[in-house]
């Protein structure tokens, strides 16, 4: 996940999970009060399904929805209700519409306690029995999901993740996981703002990967329980850093609905790899850049610190390679003291303007220019190796265009003169440069000669060399 901890997972099949003490209420209700009207209002748009062409997500009305995500992993157990309201209100004001979150916290995912308890001592289960739910804990989860919903935020929710799997659920059987998943979906499937997740820095070992490790069977039991309860919301798994895509694991490839792209290398590598895969029984599937370098962190030793430019490159490389949105994160994923004062950073402001720009276009029609290159010279070297590479150590140019040629977007990460195929540019087209460090600012007219050469304008407002070329008919 956010740091270089990539231990393999092995589950001991021995019965229900242990740990935790009895608390106030021991029942496990299968339903809660109906989701309030504000959550289900026409103003709220939530990730609800995969598009028919398998390239992006749709909201509950069947319209394309651009994922504009953040990663508050442990908020469910680290926040007070007032802090949850503060967080989601702030993220709404900054243009975020999605969050990656675990339903249960342990130190590995930012939580305060190995038994899954909240900061103020609420445990999720009674005597560690994952089918005996402690109602005060889950009532708080209800409240936080409602808050997220009211602020237009889809929660990419992990009922079990790669860290709770080895702690709270350490001795869970597939059968018990099925029951837990069924109970979870019965309680939460009425929320319109949930996408189902599992895994997280998850690298299971097995002699036969396609047959699955014991831990895979537990997580699959959870998913089967969710489906048995009638929920058809999209599902995927986040694997370890060595697996860039969810479909890279043969056990999970047949069941995931989209690819969680997880990479610390240039993001176009994994997104384009998924985009270029042959059409199959379940492909194409959306390949969403969901985790990379976090603001304030760098998981690769002896490489530059993560900068605002790093974060821009990750997002724009992904968007111009077919990702239907992107997630960002910061080293406040575990909500270190004073996190409230660090919500509004220059990187967040830059990303908000980039997302607003992208949202203003028919972004779901953009096709990466891999089969019919728009950029024909000075692209740089496309990274395809399995070796790690810092984002700032590569300068490959990515581009995407609509089939009718009415819109094309080219991301140029360093200063240079690129060459375009002029036959692919309508005669009536205008070419402008957008400063990614100030995407809401005035564009600059781009110069193109008769051979299609287009020079970048110099340094951007952030003092860096990356620019976004926009071609509109």
Image (tube, grey):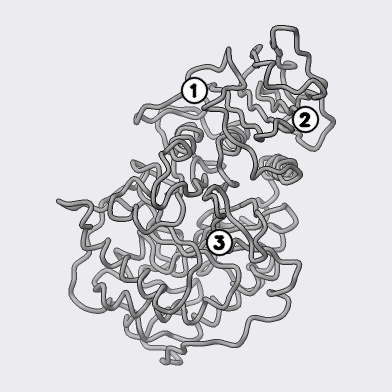
The kind of secondary structure element at disc 2 is strand
Residue occupying the far left of the picture: 207
The kind of secondary structure element at disc 3 is strand
User: Which of labels 2 and 1 is toward the front?
Assistant: 2
Location of mark 1 (residue) = 393
Q: Residue 196's x, y, as percent?
A: 47, 65
Question: Image quadrant for the C terminus?
Answer: top right
Q: Distance between the residues labelled 2 and 3?
A: 30 Å
* Callout 2–callout 3 Cβ contact below 8 Å: no
The kind of secondary structure element at disc 1 is helix
Q: Which of 19 and 179 is in front in this view?
A: 179
Q: Residue 334's x, y, as percent?
A: 50, 57
- Does residue 162 sit above or below 296 in this rendering? below
Residue occupying the far top of the picture: 450
Which of the two labelled residues, at mark 2 and mark 3, occupies the earlier sequence position? 3
- On screen, residue 174 versus residue 29, left or right, reads left
Instruction: Give the numbered dot on residue 49.
Output: 3
Q: Residue at x 54, y 22 (%)?
A: 396
Q: Is residue 307 visible?
A: no
Q: Nearer the viewer, residue 109 or 287?
A: 287
Instruction: Give the numbered dot on residue 472.
Output: 2
* Label 1 crowd (10 A; few <14 / some 14-19 / many >=20): few
Q: Which of 341 and 128 is in front in this view?
A: 128
Q: Is residue 110 visible?
A: yes
* Callout 2–callout 1 Cβ contact below 8 Å: no
Q: Residue at x 69, y 7 (%)?
A: 451
Residue 320: quarter of image: top right
């Amino acid at each position: 996940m956010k740091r270089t901890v990539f231990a393999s997972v092995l589950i001991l099949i021995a019965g229900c999970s242990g740990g935790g003490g009895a608390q106030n209420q021991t029942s496990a209700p299968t339903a809660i009060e109906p989701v309030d009207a504000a959550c289900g209002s026409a103003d709220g748009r939530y990730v609800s399904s995969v598009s028919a062409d398998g390239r992006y997500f749709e909201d509950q009305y069947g319209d394309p929805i651009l994922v504009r995500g953040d990663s508050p992993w442990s908020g469910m157990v680290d926040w007070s209700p007032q802090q949850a309201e503060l967080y989601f209100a702030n993220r709404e004001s900054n243009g975020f519409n999605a969050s990656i979150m675990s339903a249960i916290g342990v130190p590995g995912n930012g939580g305060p306690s190995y038994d899954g308890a909240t900061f103020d001592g609420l445990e999720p289960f009674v005597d560690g029995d994952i089918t005996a739910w402690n109602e005060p804990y889950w009532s708080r989860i209800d409240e936080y999901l409602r808050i997220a919903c009211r602020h237009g935020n889809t929660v990419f929710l992990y009922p079990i993740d790669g860290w709770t799997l080895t702690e709270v659920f350490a001795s869970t059987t597939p059968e018990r996981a099925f029951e837990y998943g069924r109970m979870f979906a019965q309680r939460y499937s009425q929320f319109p703002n949930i996408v189902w997740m599992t895994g997280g820095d998850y690298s299971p070992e097995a002699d036969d990967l396609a047959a699955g490790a014991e831990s895979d069977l537990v997580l699959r039991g959870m998913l089967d329980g969710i489906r048995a309860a009638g929920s058809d919301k999209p599902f995927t798994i986040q694997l370890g850093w060595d697996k860039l895509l969810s479909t890279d694991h043969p056990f999970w490839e047949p069941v995931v609905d989209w690819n969680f792209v997880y990479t610390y290398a240039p993001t176009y590598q994994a997104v384009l790899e998924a985009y270029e895969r042959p059409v199959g029984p379940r492909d194409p599937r959306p390949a969403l850049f969901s985790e990379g370098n976090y603001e304030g962190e760098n998981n690769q030793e002896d490489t530059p610190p993560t900068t605002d430019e790093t974060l821009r490159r990750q997002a724009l490389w992904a968007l111009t390679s077919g990702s239907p949105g992107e997630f960002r994160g910061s080293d406040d994923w575990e909500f270190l003291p004073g996190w409230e004062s660090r919500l509004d950073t220059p990187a967040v402001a830059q990303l908000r303007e980039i997302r607003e720009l992208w949202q203003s276009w028919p972004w779901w029609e953009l096709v990466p220019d891999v089969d019919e290159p728009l950029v024909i010279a000075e692209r740089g070297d496309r990274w395809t190796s399995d070796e790690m590479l810092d984002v700032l150590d590569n300068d490959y140019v990515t581009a995407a265009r609509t089939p009718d040629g009415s819109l094309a977007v080219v991301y140029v990460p360093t200063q240079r003169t690129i060459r375009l195929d002029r036959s692919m540019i309508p005669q009536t087209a205008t070419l402008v440069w957008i400063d990614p460090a100030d995407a809401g600012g005035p564009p600059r007219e781009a110069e193109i000669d008769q051979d299609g050469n287009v020079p970048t304008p110099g340094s951007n407002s952030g003092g860096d060399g990356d620019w976004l070329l926009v071609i509109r008919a």
